[in-house]
Amino acid sequence: MATGTEPHPNSGGVRARTRAAISAPHLRTDRWWLAPAVTAAGLFAFIVYSTWRAFANADYYAAPYVSPFYSPCLAENCKAMPSGPNADLFGGWWAISPAIIILVFPLGFRLTCYYYRKAYYRSFWASPPACAVAEPHAKYSGETRFPLILQNLHRYFFYFALLVACVLTYDTVLSFRDTHENWGHMGLGSLVFLANIVLIWAYTLSCHSCRHIVGGKLKHFSQHPVRYKAWQFVGKLNNRHMQLAWASLVSVALADFYVYLLASGVFDDPRFF
């Protein structure tokens, strides 16, 4: 006998014929929506800020600091230290912001990151919005079709992320020079850059791809003690992958914003020595 709660014959997902006919969308009574809402707000704020800074094409260098959004700066209109890590490889034909050249690599690494997939799948696509909460989509094809199949590029973006981290490490070393390129300087910006690069490296090395590269395909850890130790270290970082993802996202934005404040003349870099 019909009860009025049967799923529609043509419906899919949790309302398919093979699923239990439960009238309630879910049985959770807690504020399950809060976590995806906060995640969406945080990611949206970073997207807005990074887009503005990437296309600004200004206020990204204040000796001896160069914004991480613009480093390595490969366009002719980049004004950094002559002995710094930047080069005019693209010449004058590149008319838009030089940040567009380089940001594709760290952003590609983060967009395909396992944690960030979970974050924006839940917060923006509601796929699913939370544990034990059904997603509104009738069908699910996973990451087997375009465009989500491109998530498999994560392992390759990892190598580019390593290169970017090396460049930002060099920038951090250069931040301990004064405006005349003499060593022995340390300002507040030096500490900002130092904190940022520590978090960048921690997040990069905590990546699942890094863990697989270090310890994957090993049948006997006892025969590879060095790789085993490295795998254990990366595994401990991997346990904090979510926290490191957020911390490094905030730190790179703060480092860029700090350079922006200096370059736009809001205040001078406090110098310790």
Image (tube, rainbow, N blue to C red):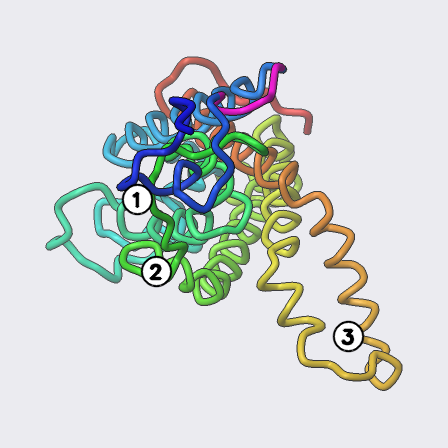
Image vertical order of residue 39 relative to residue 73, above or below? above
The residue under the point 68% across, 25% down is 272
**Label 3, label 2: how many angstroms apart (C-alpha)?**
29 Å
Residues under labels 2 and 1: Cα distance? 23 Å
Main SS, magenta region, reads: loop
Looking at the figure, which quarter contains the C terminus?
A: top right
Q: Amino acid at mark 1?
A: Ala
Query: Which one is nearer the viewer's eye here, 45 or 261?
Result: 45
47 with respect to 219 (left or right): left
Position of residue 143 measured from the top left corner of the image (x, y, whole percent):
39, 57
Q: Is residue 166 left or right of residue 109?
A: right
The reply to whether the C-beta atoms of the residues labelled 3 and 2 are less than 8 Å apart is no
Q: CA distance from mark 3 to mark 1?
A: 36 Å
Residue 20 drawn at (x, y percent): 51, 37
Q: Secondary structure at mark 1?
A: helix
Q: State the residue position of label 3.
A: 227
Badge 3: residue crowd in 10 Å (few <14, some 14–19, many ≥20): some
Numbered range of the magenta stretch: 24-29
Q: Which residue is mark 2?
A: 150
